[in-house]
């Protein structure tokens, strides 16, 4: 008999090596074993294994139910094994068995949840018979559902009922979960600070919540207290410690723990979360993407239903396979977490319309579930990438209306406030965030958004304070001091430059009045002040454009790429060429750019170019000098055009984009006539900035910071020149997907 029953370990090993040549064979073997009188427990275990591996088992499940018609476990496994057309009947059969037995309603409710029928599942739990032998277990499940659906009063009632019947660890865990989801992270922190002793299960829940919230001050403390519990199970604790290392970005520490704790000779026996951690550690330590992809694909054959593993496999494919081929693959509509995986992939590829389509089926199915918050938020993200701010706002507002607990509300509110800020609606953004400050005071994205709101309002000191708090928390996460980032530099520069004249930057003051009070030169000398006023002018519609029939930007598109192209670059390069057949395309690398600089400007500039070590620094220096002399379009190759940019050039002497973040002028796309005053000023500013430092920073010394100063100087000295077309990032996004997350950006050589 044992020779016919599927052996999960042997199947896992076979799947680790390759797809099964006959995937139906294990199910057929189980069917035969059932017909020969296999033991009930063996059949249940075999069905569970086949379902976990997504191997066909419908016929075997039907036969098992014929032998044991009252088994709830077999009915559950039969539902999981059912093809789509048979699921309604399988669910009905499970419901009949549960109702007849008057027990284990939580099993039926969970089945409804998996089939995106939350209302049916809730009604199952509402009908719990408190005299049932499984009432306590079922009520615990009802508490979990109530908390997830925001029915906190019902959860309180049920917890009070359980208090007299199930005192202990699980009750404490549920109460803490209720506090977090109803009242937020700050309320949970008070509970943690007041805990003197607790069980391992309580510390496990708290560590999970704290790591999800990026609380790297309390999370290590909780893990230490968990480790001191006599009932601590080594497996879950080890996995939590590895997760802490991964969230801190310490791949080497996580890798060392994995190598010590896992059986490296039998990876097919690992759990799916173990594979996820192994792959995450491998990415952090820079292991070859091809090697990691092979591991991920093998792990997905063993654990095909694990969503996070599937998402990692997709990411690793993008690090190895040509993005043109990846984008050409057609996916089928899905009503599961996999639709979100496909959506995220489409967004990474710069395809917002496809991302929205991927969500269509799931959007309807998940309407009344917590998953709906994420679905609508991703829809909003797709609209945002496409430059459709109003549609993004509508979708994100719907996501917020779907949120039932404080965690989902915080996620949705942050994203909605981001969209309001992109529209220049500062008051609406603040209103959206009002409750979050008390509930989630140290949530990292909230601190960054508060800084940008304060910067936009001219309160540079408050923006700097928010950044300082963010940096303190990041140091707790990484256990290392981080150098000032773009955001730190732009805000600190603005605060220092505006010192003594802070009131001139109050948000209600017209830009012209601020310039009059500060002086044009003081504004231009500061990238931070220039960006603040550029952002305001864009929001207020003051960046006017009037076509000049004599304007002519050369129909040339230049790119710079140093090193191997990798899987993503060829698609973008070919797309720029395909959409612009009347343009000359020029691709420079370090050798050809160096030669061009020598021929055009002489040996000294070539030497300065060659002394720069970072590819980003070389690209930024080269683009300035190339545009100054030849003019045309300069586009980074992580910009993916969905439509031609030629219409922007008509009647324009220059086309630039005002970035969404702080109002700086982007340098990932620039189009200017030869010897345009903005380019010549940028050249002057960049060389002066280079002369002042031995450690140039791409974005600051030769990138957007200096382009922003030059654009502001041009506006203030030549206000009559309306031939400069300023694009908002939304306008830019309607034609070009920007700053795509290419695999090379994870490498230490990337400029950030």
Image (cartoon, helix red, strand yellow):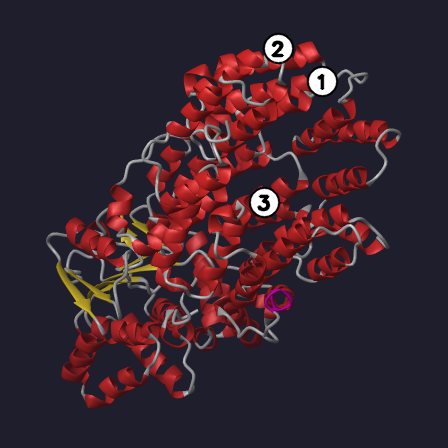
Sequence-wise, the earlier of marks 3 and 2 is: 2
According to the image, label 2 marks what residue? 96
According to the image, label 3 marks what residue? 411
Question: Residue 42 appears in which quarter of the rendering?
Answer: top right
According to the image, label 1 marks what residue? 103
Total numbered badges shown on the rendered structure: 3
> Residue extending furthest bottom?
604
Q: Is residue 494 left or right of residue 574?
A: right
The magenta segment: 474-478
> Could you say where residue 616 lies in the image, as x and y percent from the top left?
34, 72
Nearer to us of marks 3 and 2 is 2
Residue at left offset 55%, top offset 56%? 262
Nearer to us of marks 3 and 1 is 1
Asked whether 90 falls inside the magenta stretch, the response is no
Spatial distance from mark 1 to mark 2, Cα to Cα? 11 Å
Quadrant showing the C terminus: bottom left
> Could you say where residue 499 lies in the image, as x and y percent from the top left?
60, 75
Decide: is 629 above or below 432.
below
């Amino acid at each position: 008999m044992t020779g016919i029953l599927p052996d999960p370990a042997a199947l896992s090993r076979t799947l680790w090596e390759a797809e099964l040549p006959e995937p139906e064979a294990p199910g057929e073997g189980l069917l035969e074993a059932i017909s020969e009188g296999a033991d009930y427990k063996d059949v249940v275990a075999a069905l569970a294994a086949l379902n976990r591996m997504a191997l066909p088992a419908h016929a075997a499940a039907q036969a098992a139910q014929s032998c044991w018609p009252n088994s709830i476990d077999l009915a559950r496994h039969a539902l999981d094994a059912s093809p789509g057309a048979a699921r309604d009947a399988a669910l009905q059969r499970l419901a009949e068995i549960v109702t007849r037995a008057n027990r284990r309603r939580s099993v039926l409710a969970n089945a409804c949840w998996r089939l995106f029928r939350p209302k049916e599942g809730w009604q199952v739990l509402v009908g719990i018979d408190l005299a049932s032998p499984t009432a306590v277990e079922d009520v615990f499940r009802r508490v979990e559902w109530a908390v997830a659906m925001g029915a906190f009063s019902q959860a309180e009632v049920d917890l009070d009922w359980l208090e007299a019947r199930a005192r202990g660890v699980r009750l404490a865990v549920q109460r803490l979960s209720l506090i977090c989801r109803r009242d937020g992270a700050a309320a949970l922190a008070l509970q943690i600070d007041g805990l003197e002793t607790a069980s391992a299960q309580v510390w496990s829940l708290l560590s999970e919540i704290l790591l999800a919230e990026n609380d790297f001050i309390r999370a290590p403390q909780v893990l230490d207290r968990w480790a001191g519990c006599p009932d601590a199970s080594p497996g879950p604790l080890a996995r939590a410690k590895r997760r802490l290392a991964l969230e801190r970005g310490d791949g080497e520490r996580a890798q060392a723990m994995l190598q010590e704790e896992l059986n490296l000779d039998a990876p097919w026996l690992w759990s799916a979360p173990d594979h996820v951690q192994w792959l995450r550690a491998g990415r952090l330590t820079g292991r070859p993407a091809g090697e990691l992809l092979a591991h991920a694909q093998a792990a997905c054959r063993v654990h095909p239903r694990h969503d996070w593993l599937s998402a990692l496999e997709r990411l690793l494919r993008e690090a190895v396979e040509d993005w043109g081929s990846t984008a050409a693959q057609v996916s089928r509509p899905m009503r599961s977490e996999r639709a979100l995986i496909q959506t995220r992939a489409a967004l990474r590829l710069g395809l917002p319309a496809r991302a929205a389509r991927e969500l269509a089926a799931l959007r309807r199915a998940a309407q009344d579930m917590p998953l709906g918050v994420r679905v609508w938020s991703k829809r909003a993200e797709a609209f945002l990438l496409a430059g459709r701010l109003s549609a993004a706002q509508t979708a994100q507002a719907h996501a917020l209306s779907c949120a039932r607990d404080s965690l989902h509300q915080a996620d949705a509110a942050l994203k909605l406030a981001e969209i309001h800020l992109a529209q220049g609606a500062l008051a609406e953004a603040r209103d959206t965030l009002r409750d979050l400050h008390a509930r989630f005071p140290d949530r990292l994205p909230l601190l960054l958004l508060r800084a940008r709101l304060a910067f936009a309002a001219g309160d540079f000191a408050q923006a700097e304070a928010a950044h300082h708090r963010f940096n303190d928390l990041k140091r707790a996460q990484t256990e290392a001091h981080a150098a000032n980032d773009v955001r730190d530099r732009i805000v600190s520069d603005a605060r220092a430059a505006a010192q003594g004249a802070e009131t001139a930057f109050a948000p209600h003051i017209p830009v012209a009045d601020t310039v009059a009070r500060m002086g044009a030169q003081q504004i231009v000398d500061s990238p931070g002040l220039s960006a603040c006023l550029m952002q305001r002018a864009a929001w207020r519609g003051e960046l006017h454009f009037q076509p000049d029939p004599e304007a002519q930007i050369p129909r040339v598109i230049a790119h710079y790429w140093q090193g191997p192209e990798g899987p993503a670059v060829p698609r973008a390069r070919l797309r720029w060429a395909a959409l612009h057949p009347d343009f000359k395309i020029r691709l420079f690398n370090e050798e050809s750019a160096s030669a061009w600089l020598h021929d055009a400007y002489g040996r000294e500039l070539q030497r300065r170019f060659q002394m720069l070590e970072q590819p980003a620094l070389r690209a930024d220096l080269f683009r300035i000098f190339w545009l100054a002399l030849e003019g045309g379009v300069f586009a980074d190759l992580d910009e993916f055009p969905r439509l031609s940019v030629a219409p922007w050039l008509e009647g324009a002497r220059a086309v630039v984009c005002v970035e969404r973040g702080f109002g700086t002028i982007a340098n990932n796309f620039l189009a200017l006539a030869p010897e345009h005053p903005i380019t010549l000023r940028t050249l002057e500013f960049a060389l002066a900035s280079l002369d002042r430092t031995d450690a140039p920073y791409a974005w600051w010394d030769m990138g957007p910071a200096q382009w922003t100063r030059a654009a502001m100087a041009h506006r203030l000295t030549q206000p009559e020149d309306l031939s400069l077309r300023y694009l908002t990032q939304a306008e830019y996004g309607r034609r070009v997907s920007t700053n795509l997350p290419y695999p090379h950006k994870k490498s230490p050589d990337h400029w950030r």
